[in-house]
Image: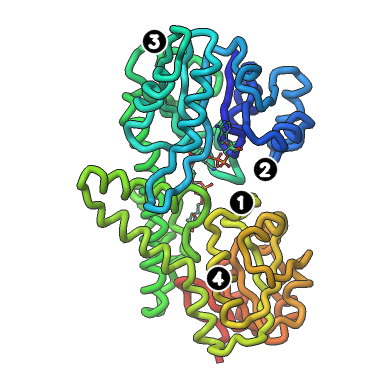
Amino acid sequence: MKISVIGTGYVGLVTGVCLTEVGHEVTCIDIDEKKVKSMREGISPIYEPGLDEMMKANIERQRLFFTSSYEEGMEGKEVVFIAVGTPQSKDGSADLTYLNKACKSIAQNMKRDLIVVTKSTVPVGTNEHVEQEITKHITNGFKVKVASNPEFLREGSAIYDTFNGDRIVIGAEEEAVLDKVRSIYESFNLPIVSTDLRSAEMIKYASNAFLATKISFINELGNLCEKLGANIENVSAGMGMDQRIGNKFLQAGVGYGGSCFPKDTNALLSIGKSYGHDMPIIQSVIDTNEKQQRIIVDKIKEYSPDLLNKKVAVLGLAFKPNTDDMRDAPSIKVVRELVDAGAEVHAYDPIASENARIFLPGSTVYNSSVDEAIEDADFAVIMTDWKEIKEYELQKFTKLLKNPVLFDGRNCYNLQEVAQYGLSYYSIGRPTVGMN
Ligand SMILES: NC(=O)c1ccc[n+]([C@@H]2O[C@H](COP(=O)([O-])OP(=O)(O)OC[C@H]3O[C@@H](n4cnc5c(N)ncnc54)[C@H](O)[C@@H]3O)[C@@H](O)[C@H]2O)c1
Ligand SMILES: O=c1ccn([C@@H]2O[C@H](COP(=O)(O)OP(=O)(O)O[C@H]3O[C@H](CO)[C@@H](O)[C@H](O)[C@H]3O)[C@@H](O)[C@H]2O)c(=O)[nH]1
């Protein structure tokens, strides 16, 4: 099928590339001309394992195209996917500015009847708004039908998730529209949930909010475990074996970050508010996470109340491994607080350092290896569980740090192993090792 995808962030680009991989012809449209130029040359603007290769192969097969012109990008297409950003507004609600602009541009460039499929995460009722908004701007009598097709990919495993997702959700009010969108995904061979528009939109928020709830829940228990002398990892393992609970998303740490959970939980609250519906569970999930994102700072300040001129190595900056995305990364709060307290932060991240410069204080020093960051540092703090960091030799911390003290916000190491290397080791929800 001939398809346009509007917006080439994680979702748009990965969708466009994966749809071409199964044989569709896709033109991706983005208003960012710099991005379009680089993508035309086969260079992905985002770091995502496997994406560059698949992108280049489909450009060569002449199935994948990029443009900043709606006229060119929509030429001959029967389905248009919208994947523009829906960031958080100041009041917590989803900002639909980009979506509204995309609707207007679609309407102005329609040369046939169209199905418009929204992949962006949007408040319940937005797809109806998309249909009205496009219809309002159509001047040539063509008709638009809409479908909701929320995206569930995770950054860092986006290609894998697209081809191996647990389900594809499609919402529409007409069977013919559902059929058309289902046919696009036929060769993915994944379970498809066909539903109405509003339920499809709600499934997305409900899923993210539930996953965020699991994380805040386990973090709250982890903090209690520390006081009780229990180990949250053993607790998670024991709980997770109950299949009604499941063992995923029960990893305690410095809280959830990224471009989705924080903004989507806030947007869900805001949707509730606009209907006069309180959501105390979601509010607590958000509040717990806000505290958890800086819990490592409390531990650091307890260990070293005076941070003035202390050299602190921060290992990992991205909100999770295998991505260079810094949006709402817990490292932002932690580095800012350390710098505010007078510490000199030496940071290392395998790929997110460039993006990190936009978010972190100007005084942050970016190192090119773990060795370099921890050498002569007063102590080290792990913020992202990159494989490289998890597999870093523990004895090097003892050897290179000025004081053998490690704060681990992602529980990367085994407590027994740490104990062998004479480190003082503070992690999340587990007993402290080697504290003297
Ligand atoms: N990032 C994820 O992992 C993820 C996963 C699932 C769902 N989502 C949702 O998908 C949507 C997109 O997220 P993202 O992270 O891919 O977005 P992003 O912000 O990284 O990228 C959005 C892109 O859209 C482009 N754009 C903005 N307005 C445009 C317009 N009028 N016409 C054409 N292009 C335009 C921007 O230039 C940018 O390249 C959001 O609603 C998000 O919540 C994201
Ligand atoms: O047990 C866990 C699992 C995750 N996290 C943290 O939670 C955040 C989000 O992680 P993850 O869900 O893997 O990343 P995202 O790429 O943000 O993906 C989420 O957000 C996307 C955007 O909506 C959805 O499409 C995905 O299904 C959903 O998992 C990260 O900071 C993780 O470190 C934990 O602290 N503990």
On the image, numbered disc 1 is attached to which residue? Answer: 325
- Image quarter for ligand 1 equals top right
On the image, numbered disc 2 is attached to which residue? Answer: 46
Instruction: Please state which amino acid type lies under the numbered disc 4.
Output: Val
Q: Disc 1 and disc 2: Cα gap in Å?
A: 8 Å
On the image, numbered disc 4 is attached to which residue? Answer: 334
Crowding near the residue tagged with mark 3, few <14, some 14–19, many ≥20 C-alpha atoms within 10 Å: few
Q: Reply above or below: 217 against 176.
A: below
Residue at (48% x, 47% y) in the render: 260
Where residue 416 appears, as percent x and y from the top left, is 58, 75
Q: Disc 2 and disc 3: Cα gap in Å?
A: 35 Å
Q: Disc 4 and disc 2: Cα gap in Å?
A: 24 Å
Instruction: Please state which amino acid type lies under the numbered disc 2.
Output: Ile
- Label 1–label 3 contact, CB within 8 A: no
Q: SS class of the residue under badge 3?
A: helix
Ligand 2 neighbours mark 4 (CB distance < 8 Å): no
Q: Reply above or below: 16 against 300.
A: above
Ligand 1 neighbours mark 1 (CB distance < 8 Å): yes
Where residue 71 appears, as percent x and y from the top left, is 62, 17
Residue at (32% x, 24% y) in the render: 196
Ligand 1 neighbours mark 2 (CB distance < 8 Å): yes
Q: Disc 1 and disc 3: Cα gap in Å?
A: 38 Å
- Label 1–label 2 contact, CB within 8 A: yes
Q: Residue 402 carries which label?
A: none
Residue 407 quadrant: bottom right
Q: Residue 176 carries which label?
A: 3
